[in-house]
Image (tube, grey):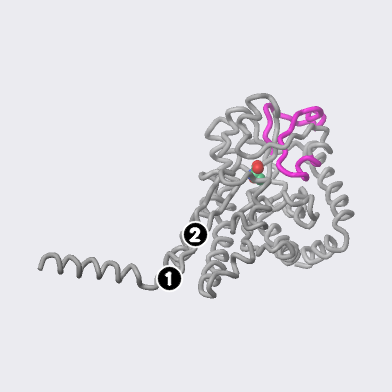
Amino acid sequence: MTLSIRSLGLAAILGAAALPAAAQTAWDMPTPYGDTVFHTQNIIQFADDVREATGGELDITVHSAGSLFGHAEIKDAVRRGLAPIGEILLSRLSNENPVFEVDSIPFLADSYADAGALWEASRPAVEELLAEQGLTLLYAVPWPGQSLYLTEEVTDPAALQGVSFRAYNTATEQLATLLGMIPTQVEAGDIPTAFATGRVSAMMTSPSTGVSSQAWDYTSVYVDVQAWLPKNVVFVNTEAFEALTEDQQAAVMEAAAAAEARGWEMSEAETETQIAALTENGMTVTKPSEALSAALAEAGAVMAEEWLGRAGDAGAAILEAYEAD
Ligand code: PCA
């Protein structure tokens, strides 16, 4: 008797387990920046939204801070299907096409309104170039404006001559060179070590990255220029995306649109709070001198012209659409 009840229970459990379960998909998502960075927090929310909207059918695991693939490998990893989805700094692809770099030209779009207009003007071209590689763009979110971190106050731009400068893409390398500095590429996560070991002694980045890398430990002056707002992009391997059900695809697109809107708001809100955090931690927050502003503006103008030369008709079309906005 006992035995038969037990068998019955077992049969019920086995029966339940044998029910056709909804297809479960698990996606690993490599990202370059650390967990405390607002981009990463936004992505974690995106993954939660997707999980909820699909009733747990699509489960995205975020691997932050380059822990699954390094920043330089993420795009190709997703293109080759080694990871179905990922995030990078868009302008890191400038060696493939100058169109990817338009958001890193100093002073071309240095407010959220302008950065939004520039993204609207450049998004179709970016989308198309990624699509050619089997990648589907999901969304883009800008970093707060890029400002100068120095070990001492500089009013005369001549004082920058020979300073070793931390770069994160070719545009920041070019800017450093135009100002007479010596650029070295350093990933965001390696900034503290690069300063501590004397490899670099100046950088231009957002207040967000200044705070996440504790810039007050190795620089003392923040010069608030907010010269450009470079974007991170999130994209998916198109084949992996198309393997999802239609409902799942719609859920991903909806969560992506929400993440884009939320990310732009987070970014803008961070600008002030993270500058305040730099002050609280003892940094001197200053405005650039007239001479320094002029030197930066001149470098920006040189870069804009040089970029247009490289980007040709595609570049001109983006600038035209941007200016028409
Ligand atoms: N932080 C990233 C890119 C731009 C930014 O604000 C970095 O410094 O690497």
The answer to whether 304 appears left or right of 142 in the picture is right
Based on the picture, tell me whether residue 166 belongs to the magenta stretch: yes
- Quarter assignment of residue 264: bottom right
Q: Nearer the viewer, residue 37 or 179?
A: 37
Whether pointer 1 and pointer 2 mark residues with C-beta atoms closer than 8 Å, the reply is: no
User: Number of marks in the image?
Assistant: 2
| Residue highlighted by disc 1 | 22
The quadrant the C terminus occupies is: bottom right
Q: Nearer the viewer, residue 123 or 325?
A: 123
- Furthest residue in direction bottom, as rendered: 246
Q: Which residues are magenta?
A: 148-175
- Residue 237's label in the rendered image is none
Give residue 77's position: percent from left, percent from top.
65, 52
Q: Is residue 90 above or below residue 5?
A: above
The quadrant the N terminus occupies is: bottom left
Which residue occupies 74% across, 33% down?
Answer: 165
Give residue 254's position: percent from left, percent from top.
54, 69
Based on the picture, tell me whether residue 62 belongs to the magenta stretch: no
- Furthest residue in direction top, as rendered: 197
- Residue 26's label in the rendered image is 2
Label 1 – label 2 distance at C-alpha: 13 Å
The amino acid type of the residue labelled 2 equals Ala
Q: Is residue 228 above or below residue 20?
A: above
Q: Secondary structure at mark 1?
A: loop
Q: What crowding class fits label 2: few (fewer than 14 Cα within 10 Å), some (14-19), or many (20 or more)?
A: few
The answer to whether the residue bearing label 1 lies less than 8 angstroms from the nearest atom of ligand 1 is no
Which residue occupies 49% across, 59% down?
Answer: 26
The amino acid type of the residue labelled 1 equals Ala
Q: Is residue 93 above or below residue 236?
A: above
Q: Secondary structure at mark 2?
A: strand
Which residue occupies 56% across, 39% down?
Answer: 212
Q: Nearer the viewer, residue 7 or 138?
A: 7
